[in-house]
Image: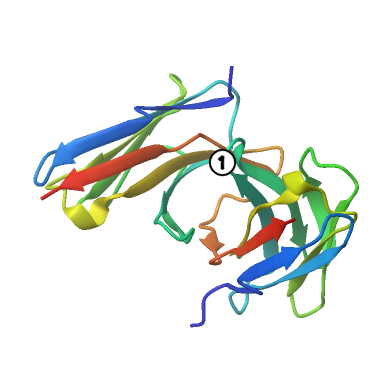
Amino acid sequence: KAGVTQTPRYLIKTRGQQVTLSCSPISGHRSVSWYQQTPGQGLQFLFEYFSETQRNKGNFPGRFSGRQFSNSRSEMNVSTLELGDSALYLCASSSDSRGNTEAFFGQGTRLTVV
Amino acid sequence: KNEVEQSPQNLTAQEGEFITINCSYSVGISALHWLQQHPGGGIVSLFMLSSGKKKHGRLIATINIQEKHSSLHITASHPRDSAVYICAVLRLGGLTFGKGTHLIIQP
């Protein structure tokens, strides 16, 4: 069974640009969550999608958005990039949206904003 | 005060030692996860607990819901156990994470 796949693995963008990250969950998983990891703040919850609907959202500005497709693949978008958006972005998939099942994480996308 | 507190922040031990990492939380939760992160960023889910105790190989996780506390134990520690161990609690639909415990096992 293939794991969670995130693309790209590494990305360098310039301040003010936008970026789209992709996450393909484990086959059969309908819940995809996104997280940001920085040295200063650690891991923080961005949002969670289940069956193409955003079910929960963390405390991030509106520049951070996402969506989920009918095949459960998810994308997150960050517009008007700031230097502070440099981080490791992780997605995790699970079989349900209640979060009380095991979460499987991807390897992450390391975004550097210059 | 963070909603999820882990201790210790850093731990260096000798191979073979019994390791305990603690996690305390201050809010009501649906479940608690223990995660392992190796250099390079990949995260592996070790346990998901809502009560009691779970064991997988040399790893044991316990949770006390009344005391809002969980522990992760590693028996017969090995250098390959060196990693960051992160406690995360599920509430309001998303995970809230501790800052992690950086564990180094020396041969």
Q: Secondary structure at mark 1?
A: loop
Q: Residue at x 42, y 37 (%)?
A: B51
Of residues A1 and B37, the one drawn nearer to the viewer in this rendering: B37
Question: Please, which chain is the residue tagged with disc 1 on?
Answer: A
The percent coordinates of residue B47 (x first, y second) are 40, 50
User: Looking at the figure, which quarter contains the C terminus of chain A?
Assistant: bottom right
When the figure is inspected, residue A102 is found, relative to residue B8, above or below; the finding is below
> Which residue lies under the disc numbered 1?
A39
Q: Is residue A39 left or right of residue B5?
A: right
For image coordinates 39% across by 46% down, the residue present is B84
Q: Position of residue A92 (x, y in %)?
A: 60, 61
Please provide percent x and percent y for residue B25. Answer: 51, 25
Comparing B27 with B100, the one in front is B100
Q: Quadrant of residue B101?
A: top left
Q: Is residue B47 visible?
A: no
What residue is drawn where x is 60% and y is 71%?
A9
What type is the residue that disc 1 sits on? Answer: Pro
Q: How many marks?
A: 1
Q: Is residue B30 left or right of residue A82?
A: left
Instruction: Using a 10 Å C-alpha cutoff, classify the residue at mark 1 as few (fewer than 14 neighbours), some (14 to 19) or many (20 or more).
Output: few
Question: Is the residue B32 above or below the residue A1 in the image?
Answer: above
